[in-house]
């Protein structure tokens, strides 16, 4: 099933899709997130049901926010992480912390900022050990090479490239986090 | 340069960032926000940890499904029936019961099907020359059929015969063995013997067949009665997409040196000694020297063998972890032990790990319900 079909199935409250995908295929993902977010035992079923209700409330408003700029699993992971962290904090502080969703960049950055962003990325690339990851990010993010073309030139499949790209972004994030720890800010 | 603007990052933007689908500006927007947004920092760290521990975290290379089971048709006997079909066609004498028992005794056939790397073992046992090949091409199929080879291909049964009422929710592939009888480009059709349909001969369009075959990484097994005319055309598995880190590369030299010592020990037991030139009659070989004294060309042969072996291990879905007191090792072993206590196979009760695909004891294909507490 495509991401689109899964989302439509969830929105339509298709029992097969909801049960097999959300409560089946996603179970290892949700269990991992809950394990990392909570340092104590929690009721898995109750928590996942609440997450499901959250996704479906207001005529599945949250689900409809998905904009297909990532895989649905990647998006769902982020949504679930945010949801469970918020739930944990609410439980601890007994007060609601309404997080502000979405402050999309409505205006494109000026060209000056575009150049600065590229330079900042190049600087972070310099701290990344894996040059293959750097190469992939340079091509895909900075040079905006089509993934299919890059995969072909690297003699790998687009699926393999997707996995490399995901790891490369994780590596970039890791470097940036270290950078922040070192300087207490991103020096840009 | 200014500090981050303290802009909240939406779930959609963050997910796009992690998938590498953001512009340079958006990427830096996320990285700037990391400076001030503790929630974002925790989310990204959690995401990284989830990915690193998740079985959904796929490798950067295509794994060979050698351990997957060909398991369609009644009682998961599709491969056995394909091999029987070929033996009958070649007029090879065999007893159906014996054949099945032999397959089970050798673990070529399990309750839940035939591991792909065991497809064709019975044909080998009956004296046929068998070749297994991944990433085969249409040309390979045509050549095999033209050369009177009998060809078993593995396909995704769900794509070859899509069930009308079945929704393919996950990426699981229903591996299924069929015998390819004819591949006709002019008519855009392939003819197969499919043990699942029991129709005798089934016809499919080439597109439909190719899509189903692709899911099994174009795996084919060809078999022919042994003759002196069989041309051996070795095609090792392509391992170019496997990268090894430096720790693993250090193993290469150790494996190469040991492999040389194993080889030399066996030769010595057979009576071989050192000689400046190879002489099979006198059993002398110039390579009967310590590994360090070998010429570089010979060392390179051992190194290539070692490197390809390590790469193949990874290509088959295994990983090598240094068994020392590293944090990674302790964490993985701890996780395995913890999970071993948590889950058991519903069929036979053997301990299973979360996300394991098959039970090692009974071969049952596991699904998420097996991991329910």
Image (tube, grey):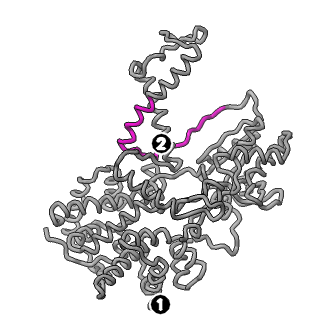
Question: Residue sitting at 42 percent across and 84 percent down?
Answer: A62
Give me the C-alpha separation between circle 1 and circle 2: 50 Å
Helix, strand or loop status at disc 2: helix
What residue is at 37 percent from the left and 63 percent from the top? B49
Q: Say if B9 sits above or below B196 in the image.
A: below
Q: Secondary structure at mark 1?
A: helix
Provide residue A79's location: percent of width, then percent of height: 39, 77
Question: Is A68 drawn above or below residue B125 in the view shown?
Answer: below
Q: Chain of mark 2?
A: B
* Residue position for label 1: A59
Image position of B93 (left or right of B148): right
Q: Of all residues shown, which one is farthest toward the left? A: B1
Which residue lies at the image location 61% right of the left edge and 70% below the top edge? B168
Residue B214 belongs to the span the image colors magenta? no
Report the side of B138 relative to B180 (left or right): left
Q: Return the x and y of residue A60 as percentages of the image width and height.
A: 46, 86
Q: Is residue A184 visible?
A: yes
**Could you classify mark 2 by the number of other residues whose Cα lies within 10 Å: few (under 14), some (14-19), or many (20 or more)?**
many
Residue sitting at x 28%, y 84%: A93
Find the magenta span and give its range.
B232-256
Q: Is residue B141 visible?
A: no
* B95 vs B4, nearest the viewer: B95
């Amino acid at each position: 099933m495509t991401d689109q079909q899964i989302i439509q199935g969830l929105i339509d409250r298709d029992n097969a899709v909801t049960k097999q995908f959300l409560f089946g295929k996603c179970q290892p993902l949700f269990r991992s997130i809950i394990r990392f977010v909570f340092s104590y035992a929690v009721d898995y079923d109750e928590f996942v049901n609440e997450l499901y209700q959250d996704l479906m409330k207001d005529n599945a408003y949250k689900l409809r926010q998905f904009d297909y700029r990532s895989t649905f699993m990647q998006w769902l992971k982020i949504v679930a992480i945010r949801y469970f962290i918020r739930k944990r904090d609410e439980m601890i502080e007994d007060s609601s912390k309404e997080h502000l969703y979405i402050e999309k960049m409505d205006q494109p950055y000026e060209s000056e900022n575009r150049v600065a962003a590229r330079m900042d990325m190049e600087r972070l690339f310099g701290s990344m050990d894996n040059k293959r990851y750097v190469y992939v990010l340079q091509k895909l993010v900075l040079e905006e090479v089509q993934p299919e073309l890059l995969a072909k030139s690297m003699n790998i499949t687009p699926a393999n490239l997707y996995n490399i790209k995901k790891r490369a972004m994780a590596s970039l994030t890791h470097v940036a986090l270290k950078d922040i720890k070192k300087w207490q800010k991103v020096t840009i | 340069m200014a500090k981050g603007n303290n802009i909240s990052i939406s779930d959609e933007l963050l997910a796009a960032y992690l998938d590498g689908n953001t512009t340079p500006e958006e990427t830096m927007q996320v990285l700037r926000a990391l400076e001030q947004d503790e929630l974002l920092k925790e989310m990204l760290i959690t995401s990284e940890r989830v990915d690193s521990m998740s079985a959904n975290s796929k490798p950067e290379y295509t794994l060979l499904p050698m351990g997957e089971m060909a398991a369609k048709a009644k009682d998961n006997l599709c491969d056995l029936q394909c091999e029987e079909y070929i033996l009958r066609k070649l007029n090879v004498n065999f007893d159906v019961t014996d054949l099945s028992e032999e397959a089970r005794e050798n673990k070529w056939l399990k309750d839940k099907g035939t591991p792909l790397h065991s497809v064709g073992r019975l044909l080998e046992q009956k004296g046929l020359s068998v070749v297994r090949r991944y990433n085969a091409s249409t040309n390979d199929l045509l050549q095999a059929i033209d050369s009177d080879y009998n060809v078993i291909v593995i396909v995704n049964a769900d794509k070859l015969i899509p069930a009308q009422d079945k929704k393919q929710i996950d990426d699981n592939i229903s591996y299924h063995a069929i015998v390819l009888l004819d591949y006709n480009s002019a008519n855009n059709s392939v003819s197969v013997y499919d043990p699942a349909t029991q129709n005798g001969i089934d016809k499919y369009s080439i597109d439909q067949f190719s899509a189903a075959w692709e899911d099994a990484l174009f795996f084919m097994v060809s078999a022919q009665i042994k003759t002196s005319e069989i041309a051996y055309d070795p095609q090792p598995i392509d391992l170019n997409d496997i990268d090894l880190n430096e720790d693993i590369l250090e193993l290469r030299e150790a494996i190469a040196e040991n492999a040389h010592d194993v080889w030399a020990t066996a030769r010595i037991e057979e009576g071989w000694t050192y000689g400046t030139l190879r002489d099979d009659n006198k059993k002398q070989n110039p390579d009967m020297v310590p590994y360090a004294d070998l010429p570089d060309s010979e060392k390179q042969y051992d190194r290539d063998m070692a490197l390809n072996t390590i790469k193949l291990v990874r290509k088959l879905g295994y990983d090598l972890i240094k068994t020392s007191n590293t944090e990674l090792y302790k964490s993985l072993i701890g996780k395995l032990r913890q999970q071993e206590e948590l889950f058991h196979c519903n069929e036979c009760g053997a301990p299973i790990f979360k996300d394991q695909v098959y039970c090692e004891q009974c071969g049952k294909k596991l699904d998420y319900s097996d991991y329910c507490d």
